[in-house]
């Protein structure tokens, strides 16, 4: 088969979606002709392979331009639909199987089979804002939006979601059920002697999908001094606002030598930190997800990676995090700062509890390895082509 895997998001830095795309592409290239479609200005198979730890020598990368609507569109809704389909045809035409990894409405599928991989449905074409249009033109636009979206979805044959959290919101916002395929995490490297280290890994961003590093620095400063240190590391884009946020997080640490804020650390250093850390903190969605569920962690790859090295997760009880962490067994999930402090101090003060949960975290992380991801995705593809895909079964972990 000829397979196209489309990485629809186009962030300033490579991330977890790119890893998931690369791992799937590498696996399917064993027996199929695979192309990875992307929007990056400059990206090679070698670069993507190095970032994701995959061999993409048998995979072709293809850059595609984003389609845009013309300034003037026909009033006839079916003429507009035909125009949209034509404009997007080049993206998926010629493939036997087309798989877009997306947050947004996917392009019309022109492949023989289409399978949507939903990261999180950030927009809701069918349900907009819940308000009733106040003008005839507004009502007409709402009706056309619903028609176009139903036709887009109708051009695909199935859907997968990266977590039950994403699955539930895809059902609410898009009216589509999905099979669950958890994203892949790599196997841990060499183990190291654990240190009195609390670690956070996450991209430094000033707005949108933020990881709340400044709030975690504030929380660490509330902890009693017991010889522990805190490291917050992650990628940061060259965007001035994000650079300013990184500087602000560093400033919030003040002169404390037991707090380190590190931007754009190499992957090898991230692995070293995972191996050294005893506790892992994660707080995405803490401050800005009340009215927008897309700001919660949709799954939590960094949490699984930390667990695979034996770092005990103490993570926010939102998004996909509670699907990963078995509260009280392989880590803790918290709802507010008081609980974050309470669970962290319990681990700091009880070495037996820390060791027991560390081993449980390692075992739990085994459920989210790359082989499980590939096998699950292959099964979904087989079921899709056999006409037996049953999204309602989800995935048990």
Image: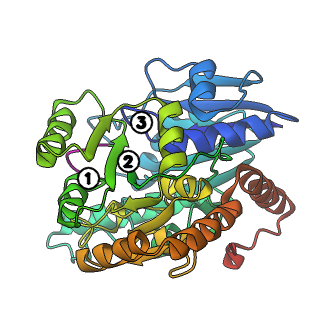
Which of 265 and 379 lies nearest the eye of the viewer? 265
Instruction: Say left or right for 27 vs 292.
Output: right
Binning the other alpha carbons within 10 Å of mark 1 as few (below 14), some (14 to 19) or many (20 upward) gives: many
Residues at discs 2 and 1 in contact (Cβ within 8 Å): yes
For the residues labelled 3 and 1, the Cα–Cα distance comes to 23 Å
Residue 205 is one of the magenta-drawn residues: yes
Q: What element does badge 3 sit on?
A: loop
Q: Is residue 108 visible?
A: no
Residues at discs 3 and 2 in contact (Cβ within 8 Å): no
**Residue, x 45% and y 75% (percent of image)?**
350
For the residues labelled 3 and 2, the Cα–Cα distance comes to 17 Å
Instruction: Say left or right for 57 vs 255.
Output: right
**Residue, x 42% and y 36% (percent of image)?**
10
Q: Which residues are magenta?
A: 204-208
Which of 356 and 206 lies nearest the eye of the viewer? 356
**Residue, x 38% and y 47% (percent of image)?**
202
Look at mark 3 in the image and give the residue it sits on.
10
The quadrant the N terminus occupies is: top right
Q: Is residue 254 above or below residue 384?
A: above
Q: What element does badge 1 sit on?
A: helix
Look at mark 2 in the image and give the residue it sits on.
202
Which of 289 and 200 lies nearest the eye of the viewer? 200
Residue depth check, mark 3 versus mark 2: number of the one nearer the observer: 2
Instruction: Say left or right for 11 vs 154.
Output: left
Binning the other alpha carbons within 10 Å of mark 2 as few (below 14), some (14 to 19) or many (20 upward) gives: many
Q: What colour scheme does the image use?
A: rainbow
Which secondary structure class fits the magenta region best?
loop
Mark 2 or 1, nearer chain start: 2
Q: Residue 96: horizontal and vertical position, in percent?
A: 77, 41
For the residues labelled 2 and 1, the Cα–Cα distance comes to 8 Å
Mark 3 or 2, nearer chain start: 3
């Amino acid at each position: 088969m000829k397979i196209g895997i489309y990485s629809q998001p186009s962030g300033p830095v490579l991330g977890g979606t790119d890893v998931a795309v690369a791992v799937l592409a590498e696996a399917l290239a064993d027996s199929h002709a695979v192309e990875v479609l992307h929007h990056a200005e400059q990206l090679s198979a070698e670069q993507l392979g190095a970032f994701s730890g995959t061999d993409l020598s048998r995979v072709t990368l293809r850059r595609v331009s984003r389609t845009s609507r013309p300034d003037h569109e026909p009033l006839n809704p079916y003429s507009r639909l035909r125009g949209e389909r034509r404009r997007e045809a080049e993206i998926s035409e010629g493939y036997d199987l087309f798989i877009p990894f997306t947050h947004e409405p996917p392009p019309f599928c022109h492949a023989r089979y289409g399978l949507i991989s939903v990261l999180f449905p950030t927009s809701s074409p069918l349900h907009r804002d819940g308000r009733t249009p106040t003008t005839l033109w507004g009502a007409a636009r709402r009706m056309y939006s619903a028609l176009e979206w139903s036709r887009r979805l109708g051009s695909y044959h199935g859907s997968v979601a990266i977590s039950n959290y994403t699955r539930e919101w895809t059902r609410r916002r898009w009216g589509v059920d999905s099979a669950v395929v958890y994203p892949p995490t790599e196997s841990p490297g060499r183990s190291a002697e654990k240190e009195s280290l609390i670690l956070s890994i996450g991209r430094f961003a000033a707005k949108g999908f933020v990881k709340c590093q400044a709030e975690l620095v504030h929380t660490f400063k509330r902890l009693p001094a017991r010889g522990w240190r805190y490291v917050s590391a992650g990628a940061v884009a060259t965007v001035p606002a994000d650079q300013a946020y990184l500087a602000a997080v560093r400033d919030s640490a003040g002169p404390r030598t037991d707090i380190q804020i590190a931007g754009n650390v190499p992957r090898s250093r991230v692995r070293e930190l995972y191996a050294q850390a005893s506790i892992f903190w994660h707080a995405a969605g803490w401050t800005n997800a009340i009215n927008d569920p897309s700001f919660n962690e949709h799954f939590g790859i960094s949490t699984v990676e930390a667990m695979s090295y034996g770092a005990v997760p103490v993570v926010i009880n939102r998004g996909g995090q509670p699907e990963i962490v078995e509260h009280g067994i392989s880590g803790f999930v918290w709802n507010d700062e008081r609980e974050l402090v309470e669970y962290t101090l319990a681990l700091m003060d009880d070495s037996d509890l820390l060791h027991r949960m560390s081993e449980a975290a390692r075992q739990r992380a085994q459920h989210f390895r790359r082989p499980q991801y590939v096998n699950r995705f292959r099964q979904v593809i087989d079921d899709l082509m056999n006409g037996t895909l049953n999204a309602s079964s989800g995935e048990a972990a």
